[in-house]
Amino acid sequence: MAFESLSEKLQNVFKNLRSKGRLTESDVKAAMKEVKRALLEADVNFKVVKTFIKAVQDRAVGQDVLNGLNPGQMVIKIVKEEMEALMGSTTTEIQLKPGNEITVILMAGLQGAGKTTTTAKIAGKYKQKGKRPLLVACDVYRPAAIKQLQVNGEKQGVPVFSMGDKMNPVDIAKASIEHAAKNGNNIVILDTAGRLHIDEDMMTELIAIKQAVDVHQTILVVDAMTGQDAVNVAKDFNEKVGVDGVIITKMDGDTRGGAALSIRSVTGKPILYIGMGEKLDDLQQFYPDRMTSRILGMGDVLTLIEKA
Amino acid sequence: TKTRDNIASGFDSIFKGFSSIDDDFYEELEEIMIMSDMGIDTTMSIIENLKKKVKEEKIKEPEECRQVLIDSIKEQMKLGEEAYDFKDKKSVVLVIGVNGVGKTTSVGKMASLLKGEGKKVMMAAADTFRAGAIEQLKEWAGRAGVDIISQAEGADPAAVVYDAVSAAKARNVDVLLCDTAGRLHNKKNLMDELKKINRIVEREYPEAYKETLIVLDGTTGQNALAQAKQFKEATDISGIILTKLDGTAKGGIAIAIQAELGIPVKYIGIGEQVDDLQPFDPDMFVNALFDRGDE
Ligand SMILES: Nc1nc2c(ncn2[C@@H]2O[C@H](COP(=O)(O)OP(=O)(O)OP(=O)(O)O)[C@@H](O)[C@H]2O)c(=O)[nH]1
Ligand SMILES: Nc1nc2c(ncn2[C@@H]2O[C@H](COP(=O)(O)OP(=O)(O)OP(=O)(O)O)[C@@H](O)[C@H]2O)c(=O)[nH]1
Ligand SMILES: [Mg+2]
Ligand SMILES: [Mg+2]
């Protein structure tokens, strides 16, 4: 795909201009058209793009072009800095309760986003760190959802709490905490059914779970390939249920992943991890700067700029 | 229906809010098309064509402009006459796509739909990889009331298809629906596995009609185009099942895919229940893009 294009395009935009000491308004405007296109091709939400472009434009006009950079690289440098500021500059971890208190983590998201798989991945991570996680099967709707969690739990060597598919997820969640307390589990991860952000009954179910048990972290799981709709999804989950952090899955594909930027900008919540495959150890730390390069569709040029 | 309303909101207002066709009008149109995931190239080329027509035909009213737009996209999304031929032949339908888009669920819904039309349907559980995939499909086979051929988790998917093809022939099945594992299009070994499945079908059942449906998640953005492209390189795709249109996503990328690759949408998914699959209706889909359902 268009992985090389933005830097090339920007070079072209500035090709006809003599290398100037300062970025003029018309230079920047021409460049912004290409940046806008790159962001839209990466699936960053249209409205987010508009706001972002405006911010970059305001900042770029009148700036001195640094030594060793051409105007195109200078614009990219500013774009990159603004985007990293938006994305958050550090990597964030899931917050755990102190000592041996039970931390309850609720996994939520649209259908097929990767919740069940990610639940098992996180459990494996904590098990390695010496914690005692318990997985809880709160998806009583999807055919064989419980079985899927059980198989994954077994692969990870982590216990799975289930009460079948005839019970209410709220009651299952409550019972699981008692079970954890009795069995010495200090992290409880609730795998919930996929749901649409506009499905009021299903959204209410999540709220009810949070009222019934002391959920410490609610994690929104989002497919990296999500398009323009990512803002609606993230906004609704955050406003209706409350979200503490985000995990972006299926980053092992070739999507540019602009949804990450959209989600970050509408919720302000940190992206915690990225899913890099179907295997249960394919979970990686999220690095905002790498994500920025990926969305912009460039790697090498940025390293050049960093050196300048 | 809910799909109509969801896709509709947004488009309607722009035609009512403008009294003349000016730059603001086109800009708003562009925004709404991009927000439906149509993609910037497709959006721009549709708008260019529209501008040309508006000039040629001396169109003055936004309302008239809208009709031109609707008609052109409708025309493009029209299905060929042979689109559903597989239903009336002895056929093997391969359902493919990336992870979590709704393949297994769509196989379940399709089985029920076809059975309702009096076809003898069978399923093949060729996703032997994902945890619980076989049990999930078995549950759907039960719901639809059709036979299913499966092996154990971890078995060779091509071997499952081999078994299923012989069973389908022996039992005089009309349509054999094969569920496959989710695979990202950039993973060569997984795409090769798909080719192997195809070769088995070709070799064991050459007289069967082959239908290959790629399932695309309606929520997916521009990457769906890359998915369609690369799956098309590995296998002959004959149609799209566009799922999850019961949400707020508009599935506009299907228009870009039709424009660039000529792959038609044949079914849409509008929920998680057994009857939430519909044959694609271009009129409804496109009208819904630009209309309120209650007009
Ligand atoms: N390639 C890839 N596939 C993934 C990743 N995470 C999950 N998947 C796959 O995506 C599909 C859906 O994952 P699930 O964990 O079942 O998703 P879910 O959100 O629990 O789905 P529902 O419960 O139906 O809403 C499965 O095929 C997973 O193997 C990832 O990071 N990369
Ligand atoms: N809202 C909605 N959900 C759907 C639709 N189609 C499928 N789903 C849900 O999406 C999730 C994933 O569906 P699956 O059928 O398991 O998807 P898949 O492509 O087989 O997934 P893998 O085999 O893991 O790659 C499930 O929770 C389904 O219930 C649809 O049209 N609308
Ligand atoms: Mg699940
Ligand atoms: Mg499946």
Image: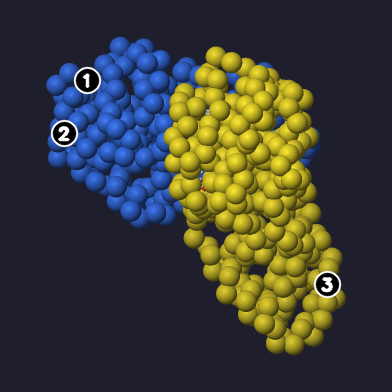
> CA separation, marks 1 and 3?
69 Å
Q: Are marks 1 and 3 on the same chain?
A: no
User: Label 1: which residue?
Assistant: B173
Please provide percent x and percent y for residue B287.
Answer: 59, 28
Residue A199 higher or lower than A80, as above or below = above
User: Label 2: which residue?
Assistant: B205
Q: Residue B228 or A192: which is nearer the viewer?
A: A192
- Mark 1 Cα shell of 10 Å, populated few (<14), some (14-19), many (≥20): some
- Which quadrant of the figure contains the N terminus of chain B? top right
Spot the blue chain and give its letter. Answer: B
User: Label 3: which residue?
Assistant: A61
**Numbered disc 3: secondary structure:** loop
Q: Is there a contact, CB below 8 Å, between mark 1 and mark 3? A: no
Mark in the foreground, 2 or 3: 2
**Numbered disc 1: secondary structure:** loop
**Numbered disc 2: secondary structure:** loop
Q: Are marks 2 and 3 on the same chain?
A: no
Please give the count of numbered marks on the rendered protein.
Answer: 3
Asked whether residue B65 appears in the rendered view, the answer is no
Q: Amino acid at mark 1?
A: Val
Spot the yellow chain and give its letter. Answer: A
Which picture quadrant has residue A36?
bottom right
Which picture quadrant has residue A292?
bottom right
For residue A139, side relative to residue B190 (left or right): right
> CA separation, marks 1 and 2?
12 Å
Chain assignment, label 3 = A
For residue B211, side relative to residue B280 (left or right): left
Q: Residue at x 65, y 39 (%)?
A: A187
What's the mark number on residue A136? none
- Which quadrant of the figure contains the C terminus of chain B? top right
Q: Residue A144 or B205: which is nearer the viewer?
A: A144
Q: Amino acid at mark 3?
A: Val
